[in-house]
Image (tube, rainbow, N blue to C red):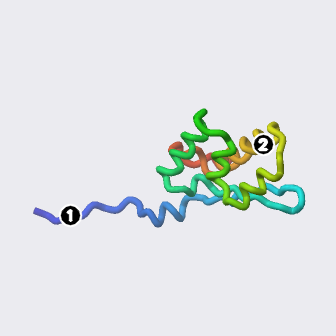
Amino acid sequence: MANDKPNISLTLAALEAEVAKPEPFVLALKGGKRITFPDLYDMPAVEAKEFFDQFEGADRTDFSLLEQWLSKPDYEAYVEARLPLRVHAALVERVMAYYQQTVGTPGEGAASKS
């Protein structure tokens, strides 16, 4: 009996090198403060799935999710900015759209580059 080894089609290192990593989304506030939104798609897959499920569900508010998503100083600066609800809602949409456009929706492959 032959001792055949299967051919390796892909390595994790090659796949990680192939996947584009976007620049973080940075919001400039008044007074020169900046808030950096970390890449949710860079989270471990299970944690990201849970986060997106929470984001789309009605169980949590945007602010509780932002508190989980942003660093503590960035979250505090965001709250202190006292953005009107319409601006807050538009910002959350823009941040999510930014990451979806740059890397695609989780589980659906990369976004089109065209």
Tell me what residue is drawn at x 41 percent, y 60 percent: 10
Task: Work out whether 102 lies above or below 71.
Answer: above
Mark 1: which secondary structure? Answer: loop
Q: What residue sits right under mark 2 in the picture?
A: 88
The reply to whether callout 1 and callout 2 are in contact (CB within 8 Å) is no
Q: Where is residue 15? Give x, y as percent.
A: 48, 60
Tell me what residue is drawn at x 60 percent, y 33 percent: 58
Is residue 25 shown to the viewer in this render?
no
Is residue 9 shown to the viewer in this render?
yes
Tell me what residue is drawn at x 77 percent, y 50 percent: 79
Q: Where is residue 65? Give x, y as percent.
A: 63, 46
Q: Please state which of the two labelled residues, at mark 1 or mark 2, is closer to the viewer.
A: 2
The kind of residue tagged 1 is Asp
Q: Where is residue 46? Give x, y as percent.
A: 47, 50
Q: What label sits on residue 4 in the rendered view? A: 1
Give the number of callouts: 2
Give the image quarter of residue 26: bottom right
Of the numbered discs 1 and 2, the one sitting upstream in the chain is: 1
Q: Where is residue 82? Give x, y as percent.
A: 83, 47
Mark 2: which secondary structure? Answer: helix
Residue that extends furthest to the top in the rendered view of this protein: 58
Tell me what residue is drawn at x 53 percent, y 65 percent: 17
Within 10 Å of disc 1 (Cα), the crowding (few <14, some 14-19, many 20+) is: few
Q: Please identify the quadrant where the N terminus is shown.
A: bottom left
Pick the front one: 58 or 110: 58
Within 10 Å of disc 2 (Cα), the crowding (few <14, some 14-19, many 20+) is: some
Label 1, label 2: how many angstroms apart (C-alpha)?
58 Å
Pick the front one: 5 or 27: 27
Pick the front one: 11 or 89: 89
The kind of residue tagged 2 is His
Q: What label sits on residue 77 in the rendered view? A: none
Residue that extends furthest to the left in the rendered view of this protein: 1
